[in-house]
Structure formats: C-alpha cells, structure tokens
C-alpha cells in the first residue's frame, strides 16, 4: 500500500528492455515454427497405421506433455551437456524445451483434427487412385488443419508466454532484462509490471484477431 | 464380347466372420450388372473387393484379362503401388458422395486427373467440364459441394469418377442416402451412362433400375450368389424362396397397377 509508482526509470532503461523484447520475439518465432511444424509431423506419425511409427510418436508426446517446460529447459541446460557431451547455451536449451513441449501438445491437436475427418474422405481419395500420402496431404490435412486452427493459435499464444521461462537459464529476453533493470534501479514493482503490460499489449490484439478468425472459419463451414 | 472384370472364387473374412464365401463373376464390356441382396448379404463387400478397397482373403480378380497381384505359393500378394494404379482405372461412387468439401465442384473433378494421372491443369479442367456437362451440372462448376443438393452432389461424384476414364464403374448404393425426390436424377445419369456403353457394376435397392437398365441381375445371399439372370426373368419369376421373399419385401407397398 502507498507505493508511489515511478515508471521514469523504466523509460530511461527502455533500450535495455528493447533488447529483451527483441530476444522474446526471436525465440518465439523459432519455437512456434519448430513447435507447430514439428507437431504436424509427430501428429501424423501418431495417426500412422504402422506401430513402428505410431508408438515412438506416442512415447514422445507422453514424455514431453507430462513434464513441465521449466524443468525441461533447466534439464537441457544443466543435465543434457553432461550426459551427452553436447554443449548447450541458454538459447538452445530454451528452444529445445519450449519447442519439444509445443510439438507434443500440437501433435495431439493435429491428430484430433485428422481423426475428426470422415472416413469417407480417405475412401474417396483412395478410390481415385491416390496413395495414403497424397490423400493425407491433399484431402485430409487441409480440412483437418482448418478445423483445429483456433486450438493451434491458442498454442501459439502459450508459446509466446512460455518464452519468459527462458530467463531461468539466462537467455536475454524481456523478463530477464526487467530483472536486470530491477536489480540496478531497485524498482522491481515497476519492472515486472512493465513486463506484464508489454505482454498484454502484444497479445490482446492478437487474441481479438483470433476470435474474428474463428467466427470467419465457422461461417465458411 | 471382351471381359473387363473377372472374379474367381472370391472369399473375404473380417476377423472370424466370413462375409464372402466364394464368388465367381465375369463382367463384359458395356454390360450393366446389378447386385441385389439384403443387408449383410455381402454385396457391398464384393463390390469393394473389385477395386481393392477391401483386400480379398483369397481368390483372384482380373481387370481386362490381367491378374491383379502376384501369386506366391497359392497365396495372392499385392503391392500398394499396384493397387493405387488399379484403383485409378476403376471408378467408384459411394452412398455418402464423399466429395472434397474444401474444393469447388470442378476442383473435385480435376483432383484425381492432376494428382494421380498427371494431366495438366488445363487438360483436366477441359475433361472435368465435359463430365460435368454429361451429368448436367456444368453451371455448378465453381460452387462448393456444401451448396449442392444431395442429388447434385452424387452426380458430381459420378463426374469425378468418370473424369478418370475408368474401364468400369462401381456404384455402391448411390441413391440410398438421397431424399426420394432426388433419386430419379441420379438414376437418370446412371441409365444414360449404361446406354452410352459404360461397363457398370451396381449395388442398389432400386428394383426399377435393375429391371429397366441391367443386362444381368445377381442375387446375393449369405456371401454367395443365389440366383443370376436377365432382369426380366429373375425379377418376375425368381427360382428360390429366399429371393421371392426379398422381392416381396421390396414391393410390399407398391401402388396397384
């Protein structure tokens, strides 16, 4: 109570924060592409008839869906290099943790989408001589992905917020820079509030846009 | 008469349930053969074995005189690539149309031509237009399937199959999901096809179609062909009680002549 807000120090340190925002955007772009793109491959594999493909895909999904992202990032940073001899840096550890987790979640979204498609569509593709892959690519996925687009954009929003977890291993992103500003200027309240505001300002319009998108998609069905 | 499809001693089981118990049939070029039978008689399964939507448990199928698959120590084996090529030569129309909802009518009819047969888009478009005209739906070319009636959807499905220049057409209860008033337009398209000399194998409950259009009618019962013959004979004077029962069930509430 009685805290007198002073955002002047935040504005003075804007260049420091800006470096963090760029770091957040960079890691978001990388992880959202790897996560949602890789998830499509895992989701399709999960649906495959051959158990040699679907079982490993399922194991992957279960492992990364049932462990916390924060733990994965820390594990990739501290444990992975010792176990494998492969050096990781904060960026790589965070990218691995966030994208693998996103792959696991989005794989289940894609799989649900594929499963929701009427079996007759597979039959129609097959009957005109298409291979499994052709039917999947040309007939099944376009409709399935359109159907799960709202769920996928939701995942994308999650990924954006998850990027703050990268600060735990010292990757330079918004939260990490805010902590730096807070430590130097003794203004943690303003610093962390600024982070929350930045995320809200970016995400709110995006979320509104997805509502519009969802309504459009429903209308075209 | 040249034979298009020959089926020899076809058996099909699902797990422990034997659905087809040895079917023999030859369909000649230009012939329309209608399969009748109550549900569970195996008629749809038999049709689906012809283009290997279902893989036969045993037996042989020939298309244009060529045996499908390879025989190895008495057992047939099939390569998926061979079956895809085979299916592209056989047209199939389904009960529930199965049009591609994200493509326009003309894209539906072009898809197989471009992706499977490797035709150029312009050639495929031309062929597609010709087939849509054939079923009387040229003016719907740019519509999406959701905007069509059931009867129109089914005629597009017929055009989609025809555009592949199939050697034989399979019709699997194609009017069963339609409102009664829409059945006629689909049967009309099928009749026109038959008259133009298309080789056709039809599973249907439309006895009128069988009577007027078929060259031959088969009656399936319990996975085997019970009766076979010209429609005018077999539908008027069935030899078995089972078929008589079946026909009576279908014409129970007919208007008096």
Image (cartoon, coloured by chain):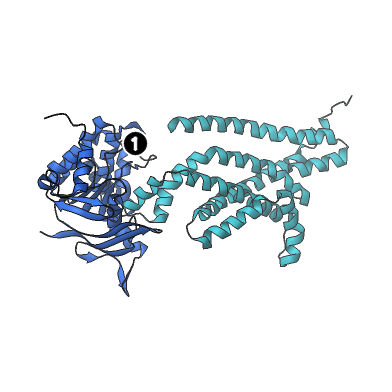
Chain colours: A cyan, B blue
For the image, the number of numbered tags is 1
In the rendered structure, the answer to whether residue A54 lies left or right of residue A89 reads left
Local SS, label 1: helix
Could you say which is closer to the camera, residue A71 or residue B183? Answer: B183
B16, above or below A8, in the image: below
Residue B94 in the image, given as x and y percentages of width and height: 30, 45
Direction bottom: furthest residue: B73
Q: Can residue B73 be seen in this view?
A: yes
Q: How crowded is mark 1: few (under 14 residues within 10 Å), some or many (20 or more)?
A: many
Direction front: furthest residue: B241
Q: Is residue A12 visible?
A: no
B155, above or below B222, in the image: above
Residue A196 in the image, given as x and y percentages of width and height: 74, 34
In the rendered structure, the answer to whether residue B252 lies left or right of residue A139 reads left
- The N terminus of chain A: image quadrant: top right
Could you say which is closer to the camera, residue A163 or residue A62? Answer: A62
In the rendered structure, the answer to whether residue B69 lies left or right of residue A203 reads left
Chain letter belonging to callout 1:
B
């Amino acid at each position: 109570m009685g805290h007198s807000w002073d955002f002047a120090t935040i504005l003075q340190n804007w260049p420091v924060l800006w470096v963090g925002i760029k770091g957040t955007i960079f890691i978001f772009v990388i992880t959202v592409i790897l996560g949602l793109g890789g998830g499509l491959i895992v989701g399709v594999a999960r649906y495959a008839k051959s158990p040699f493909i679907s079982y490993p895909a399922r194991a992957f999904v279960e492992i990364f869906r049932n462990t916390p992202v924060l733990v994965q990032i820390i594990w990739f940073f501290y444990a992975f290099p010792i176990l494998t001899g492969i050096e990781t840096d904060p960026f790589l550890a965070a990218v691995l943790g966030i994208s693998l987790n996103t792959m696991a979640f989005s794989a289940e979204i894609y799989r649900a989408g594929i499963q929701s498609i009427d079996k007759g569509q597979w039959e129609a593709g097959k009957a005109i001589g298409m291979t499994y892959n052709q039917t999947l690519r040309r007939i099944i996925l376009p409709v399935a992905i359109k159907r799960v687009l709202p769920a996928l954009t939701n995942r994308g929003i999650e990924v954006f917020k998850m990027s703050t977890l990268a600060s735990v291993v010292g990757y330079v992103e918004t939260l990490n820079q805010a902590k730096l500003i807070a430590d130097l200027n003794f203004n943690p309240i303003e610093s962390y509030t600024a982070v929350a505001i930045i995320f809200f300002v970016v995400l709110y319009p995006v979320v509104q846009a997805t509502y519009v998108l969802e309504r459009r998609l429903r209308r075209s069905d | 008469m040249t034979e298009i499809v020959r089926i020899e001693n076809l058996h099909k089981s699902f797990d422990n349930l034997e659905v087809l118990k040895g079917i023999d049939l030859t369909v000649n070029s230009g012939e329309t053969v209608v399969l009748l039978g109550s549900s569970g008689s195996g008629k749809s399964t038999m049709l689906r074995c012809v283009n290997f939507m279902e893989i036969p448990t045993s037996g042989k199928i020939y298309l244009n005189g060529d045996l499908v698959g390879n025989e190895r120590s008495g057992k047939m084996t099939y390569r998926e690539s061979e079956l895809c090529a085979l299916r592209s030569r056989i047209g199939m129309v389904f009960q529930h149309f199965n049009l591609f909802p994200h493509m326009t009518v003309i894209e539906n009819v072009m898809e197989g031509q471009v992706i499977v047969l490797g035709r150029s888009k312009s050639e495929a478009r031309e062929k597609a237009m010709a087939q849509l005209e054939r079923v009387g739906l040229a003016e719907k070319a740019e519509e999406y399937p959701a905007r069509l009636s059931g009867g129109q959807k089914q005629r597009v499905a017929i055009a989609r199959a025809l555009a592949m220049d199939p050697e034989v057409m399979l019709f699997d209860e194609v009017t069963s999901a339609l409102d009664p008033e829409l059945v006629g337009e689909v049967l009309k398209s099928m009749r026109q096809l038959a008259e133009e000399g298309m080789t056709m194998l039809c599973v249907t409950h439309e006895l009128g179609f069988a009577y007027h259009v078929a060259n031959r009618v088969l009656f399936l019962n319990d996975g085997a062909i019970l009766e076979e013959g010209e429609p005018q004979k077999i539908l008027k004077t069935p030899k078995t009680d089972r078929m008589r029962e079946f026909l009576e069930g279908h014409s129970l509430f007919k208007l008096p002549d």
